[in-house]
Structures are given as C-alpha cells and as structure tokens.
Amino acid sequence: MAVTKSEVIPIRTEHDIVVARQAVRRLSVEAAFGLVDQTKMVTAASELARNTFIYGGGGTLQCESLLEGARRGLRLTFTDQGPGIADLSLAMKDGWTSGSGMGLGLSGAKRLVNEFEIESVHGQGTRVTITRWK
Amino acid sequence: MDRIPILRMGDFLLVTIQVDMHDQLAMTLQDDLTSQIEKTGAKGVLIDISALEMVDSFIGRMIANISGMSRILDASTVVVGMQPAVAITLVELGLSLAGVQTALNVDRGMQRLRADVAGKEADDGRHQE
Ligand SMILES: Nc1ncnc2c1ncn2[C@@H]1O[C@H](COP(=O)(O)OP(=O)(O)OP(=O)(O)O)[C@@H](O)[C@H]1O
Ligand SMILES: [Mg+2]
C-alpha cells in the first residue's frame, strides 16, 4: 500500500473543525469516492475533529491518500496529547458521553468507515485512525 | 459576529442554511430562533437544509433542540430538503431525528406548517365550546 499524498491540519480552534471537514471533502473527491461515501467520511471526520478539540484540548489531523493496487482510499489520523480515555469500551458505546454530547461521535464514526482504530493512554493522549476505501 | 438570517413571513419564520456552520454559529441560530418564536408569536418554523452537505451529531442535536423548543412555545418546525446522502449518513451515524418533522422541499414544508396551524386552530375551537 502506498501513501500518495499526506497533509497535516492543526485542530486548535472550533473553526478548524470546519477546515478539517472541507479538506476531507476535497480529498474524498480526489479519491473518486461517490457522494454517499464522501458524506460518510466528512461526517466521521467532523465527529472526531470535534472530540480532538473538545476533549483532547486540540491536536492534529493527518490526511493520507492511499493506493493499494487499483484501489484508492483515504486514511485520517486524529492525534491529541489530552487526558486520554480511561475506559475505551465505555467510550465506544452508543449514547455514552462524559459531557453534554449524544455519545454518538466515536461509535457513529466507526460505523461510517471501513477501518477504525483507537489508541488512548490515560494521561497521555488519544489517537483515532479511520480509513475508507473506494 | 456572523449569524444566519431569520426571515419572517406572516405567522412563519424561515431559515435557509447556506454555509458550512461552525458549532457556535449553529448554537447562535438555535438561540436566535427560540427568542424570535417567543417575540413574534410565530406558529411555525421552516428550516431549509438543502444546501447542507453534511449533518453531524452537533448539527443534528441543534435541529432536534429547535424542534423541541418550538413545540414548547406552541410552534411547529419542519426541516426541508435534506440531501439523500446526508439522510443515509445520519441514519448510519445513529441519529434518527425522531420527533422532527421533515418534508421534501419548501412547498411541501409550507403545506405541512399550514396544516399544523389549521389543526391547532380546530383543536382550540373545540376546547372553547
Ligand atoms: N480525544 C479524546 N480525548 C479524551 N476523551 C475523549 C476523546 N474522544 C472522546 N472522548 C471521550 O469519549 C466519550 C464519547 O465520545 P463520543 O464522541 O462518542 O461522544 P460525545 O462527544 O460525548 O458526544 P457526541 O459526539 O455525540 O456529541 C466522550 O464523552 C469523552 O469522554
Ligand atoms: Mg463526540
């Protein structure tokens, strides 16, 4: 699998969530995703970017355009050095929130993509990686 | 600060969302609509989201809040024009928007609001007898 393009977007302000959505839209179009797949990837990115901003205290989004044989894909990695998630299986549950959200961000984003990985170390930060293939 | 304009048409308030809203803008719209319903005594709210290319849990929650808030203030809310790709994604995300009235387009949405108002007036008439 080859990474054909990589860019990093800082997630420092609320407005960066919009910037992240727009970058993911552009890269999804470049990867020739259909409209539904584009929308799924953008929506998942919006959820995860908001988590990075709100709970992670800010961080980065790395966008990587992928090529595997003739198959194109897009991998997004959200990284923060925030407090981490104490109980991952609880955080992944539909409807569970530690704040005032709906608890749909992580579980919903997972349903919207082909591959989902989350690593979190209590006190050190969180990294969520999602991939969608055309 | 930027805001999304709210138009008044008779008994109804109309909003067309044409930008990719950041969270604060969505919150401001929710607050503005609630206070406008109260101030004008509007009986219906129509929100046109046909230009929205994405609805995530935050915007979904805003839509549900507006709908719930308007109900408490005795007004109906109809959300019109949701793009099919957005609707499909919302369901998979896990947001059902239960309790939020939707319509295909602005015309149908206005019909729905008028029907709601007519229904409520008929109810009021019955209660007064
Ligand atoms: N990057 C992160 N750092 C620390 N905690 C996180 C992070 N992302 C998520 N969490 C924790 O996981 C919980 C679940 O996240 P999820 O996105 O599913 O729901 P939410 O953000 O609470 O609500 P919603 O996304 O529906 O508005 C959060 O309430 C928070 O406690
Ligand atoms: Mg979230």
Image: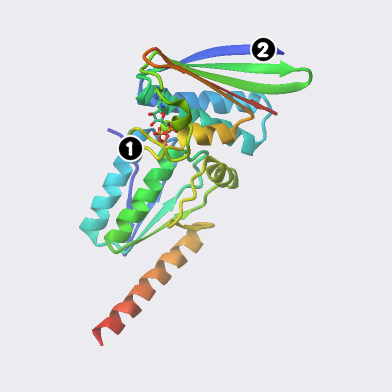
Viewport quadrant of the C terminus of chain A: top right
Residue A127 seen in the current view: no
Q: Residue at x 31, y 64 (%)?
A: B43
Which comes sooner in the sequence, label 2 or label 1?
2
Callout 1 amino acid? Ser
Q: Residue at x 62, y 39 (%)?
A: A36
Element marked by disc 2: strand
Picture quadrant of ligand 2: top left
- Residue lying furthest left: B39
- Circle count: 2
Q: Would you name the residue on which mark 2 appears? A: A4
**Quadrant in which residue B73 is drawn:** bottom left
Distance (Cα) linking label 2 and label 1? 39 Å
- Residue A44 in percent (x, y) is at 52, 31
Q: Would you name the residue on which mark 1 appears? A: A100
Residue A18 seen in the current view: yes
Element marked by disc 1: loop
- Residue B110 in percent (x, y) is at 44, 63
Viewport quadrant of the N terminus of chain A: top right
Disc 1 residue crowd, few under 14, some 14–19, many 20+, Cα 10 Å:
few
Q: Is mark 1 within 8 Å of ligand 1?
A: yes
Q: Residue at x 27, y 46 (%)?
A: B32
Q: Kindly indicate whether the residues beneath marks 2 and 1 are on one polypeptide chain.
A: yes
Of A90 and A34, the residue lying toward us:
A90
Of B114 and A44, the residue lying toward us:
A44
**Quadrant in which residue B22 is drawn:** top left
